[in-house]
């Protein structure tokens, strides 16, 4: 019987449903589901795949720590054979945190395979645990998150390529830099199955991410074209739904590569002409036809953020504006501008006017200056909270919504005397406290 996951995947590809309409929680409640011969999927926030061969089982990614018990139970309901290998597609926490219960199974402990840079990532994570706690609270509103400092280390590492076998199933592992510098993708030639990790995730490639380390869009596109040349029949992504059929798989991979290549080439052309980052950010756009694809929507990252990373990769951190090379502290500049304008409340009022006119980019800049000029003024904070809340309503990507929600919550928590993370959840849920609720008669 065909897997419900594959039925949903087909509907999304055809445009009969959107990715957000897929009931992933319900699908997970059914356990793992077969998505190719001898290959099952656990559709979590970070997907997990189980592969069965003559020589036992392998996992491709292991999910997050919250789902780990349910993942283990689901895999064990499918098969009680020993897990010989677990491949980490990269070191992000939502892909590597589910090994503990599999390690505790009877018999030899599974061998974790990863690119050699994964261990260096884990070391960096331990050194920046506080920062990662803060940015994940800011981006997702996690109230109880404490970033871990200890990780399941790989048993086997490789540099460029590696092959392992489960008897009748071969894992051809390949490295590429893309979203990360430690990415692994895999091809199972006997099954025609491609496992992409986060090199394909059903949204705009996560090649920008304003709070994270460098991304590599050029090499990412090269990897996608190498995958496309394999003519796989099934693509199993790090996030999102499978893609079945060689033509569909190739189209998704080539479209994503073309999307990235276009952003890189446009950015480099302007950089080579001497343009500043500001001009480039407001000029470069992805091709319209590609931007319309259901698997290239900016629901997580955005092309504007990708341009930032391309600039950083090729041009460093200076944006071309000489005043930004060694600027005055933000608060000093904000105070000077507030003095010129007639005070921080005047700047805040102008921010409110810009918001009313629909220019939320300008409104946010002015509201931020007003708050920096007078961080104790509750009226300024109220305007800042409202401006950023309106911005949240306008944004589509998780990254933008998270950062703007945090900014709104900072100010709203001051004016309302509430916990910042509690306010964050209210704003993320769509609450606009200054708008009266509809009356029973209106309803």
Image: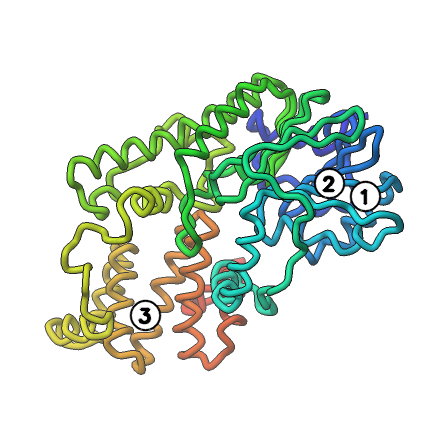
Residue identified by numbered label 2: 59
Is 108 on the left-hand or right-hand side of 203? Answer: right
Residue identified by numbered label 3: 383
Which secondary structure, mark 2? strand
Q: Which mark is residue 40?
A: none
Q: Residue at x 69, y 48 (%)?
A: 155
Instruction: Give the number of the mark in front: 1 or 3.
Output: 1
Residue 60 locus on image (x, y percent): 68, 39
Looking at the image, tell me whether mark 2 or mark 1 is earlier in sequence order. Answer: 2
Distance from the alpha carbon under mark 3 to that under mark 2? 50 Å
Tell me, what colour scheme is on the image?
A: rainbow
Is 284 on the left-hand or right-hand side of 289? Answer: left
**Front in this rendered view, residue 218 or 77:** 218
Q: Residue at x 63, y 32 (%)?
A: 162
Disc 2 + disc 1, Cβ < 8 Å: yes
Residue identified by numbered label 1: 75
Residue 433 locus on image (x, y percent): 45, 69
Crowding at mark 3 (Cα within 10 Å: few <14, some 14-19, many 20+): many
Distance from the alpha carbon under mark 2 to that under mark 1? 10 Å
Residue 429 showing in the rendered view: no
Is 308 on the left-hand or right-hand side of 115? Answer: left
Looking at the image, tell me whether mark 1 or mark 3 is earlier in sequence order. Answer: 1
Crowding at mark 1 (Cα within 10 Å: few <14, some 14-19, many 20+): many
Q: Residue at x 62, y 21 (%)?
A: 232
Q: Residue at x 72, y 22 (%)?
A: 191
Distance from the alpha carbon under mark 1 to that under mark 3? 51 Å
Residue 81 locus on image (x, y percent): 87, 39
Which secondary structure, mark 3? helix
């Amino acid at each position: 019987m065909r897997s419900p996951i594959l039925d949903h995947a087909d509907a999304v590809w055809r445009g009969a449903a959107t990715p957000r309409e897929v009931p992933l929680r319900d699908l997970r409640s059914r356990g793992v589901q077969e998505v190719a011969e001898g290959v099952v999927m656990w559709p979590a926030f970070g997907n997990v795949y189980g592969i069965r061969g003559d020589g036992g089982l392998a996992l491709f990614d292991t999910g997050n720590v919250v789902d780990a018990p349910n993942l283990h139970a689901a895999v064990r309901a499918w098969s009680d054979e020993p897990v010989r290998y677990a491949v980490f597609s990269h070191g992000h926490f939502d892909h590597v945190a589910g090994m503990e219960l599999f390690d505790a199974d009877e018999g030899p402990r599974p061998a974790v395979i990863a690119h050699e840079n994964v261990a260096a990532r884990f070391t960096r994570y331990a050194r920046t645990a506080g920062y990662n706690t803060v940015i994940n609270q800011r981006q997702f509103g996690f109230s109880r998150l404490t970033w871990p400092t200890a990780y399941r280390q790989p048993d086997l590492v490789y540099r460029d390529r590696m092959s392992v076998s489960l008897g009748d199933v071969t894992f051809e592992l390949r490295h590429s830099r893309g979203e990360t510098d430690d990415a692994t993708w895999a091809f199972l030639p006997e099954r025609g199955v491609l496992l992409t990790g986060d090199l394909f995730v059903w949204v705009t490639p996560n090649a920008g991410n304003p709070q994270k380390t460098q991304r590599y869009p050029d090499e990412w596109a090269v990897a996608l074209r190498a995958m496309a040349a394999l003519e796989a029949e099934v693509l199993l992504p790090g996030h999102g739904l499978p893609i079945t059929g060689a033509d569909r798989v190739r189209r998704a991979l080539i479209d994503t590569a073309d999307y990235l290549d276009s952003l890189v080439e446009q950015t480099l052309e302007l950089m080579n002409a001497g343009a500043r980052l500001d001009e480039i950010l407001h000029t470069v756009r992805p091709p319209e036809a590609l931007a319309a694809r259901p698997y290239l929507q900016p629901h997580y990252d955005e092309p504007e953020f990708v341009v930032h990373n391309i600039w950083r990769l090729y041009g460093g951190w200076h944006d071309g504006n000489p005043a930004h090379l060694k600027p005055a502290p933000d608060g000093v500049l904000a105070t000077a501008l507030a003095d010129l304008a007639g005070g921080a409340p005047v700047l805040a009022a102008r921010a409110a006017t810009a918001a009313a006119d629909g220019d939320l980019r300008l409104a946010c800049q002015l509201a931020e200056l007003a708050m920096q000029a007078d961080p104790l003024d509750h009226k300024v904070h109220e305007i800042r909270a409202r401006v950023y809340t309106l911005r949240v309503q306008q944004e589509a990507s998780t990254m933008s919504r998270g950062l703007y929600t945090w900014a709104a919550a900072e100010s709203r928590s001051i004016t309302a005397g509430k916990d910042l993370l509690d306010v964050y959840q209210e704003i993320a849920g769509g609450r606009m406290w200054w708008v009266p609720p509809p009356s029973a008669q209106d309803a």
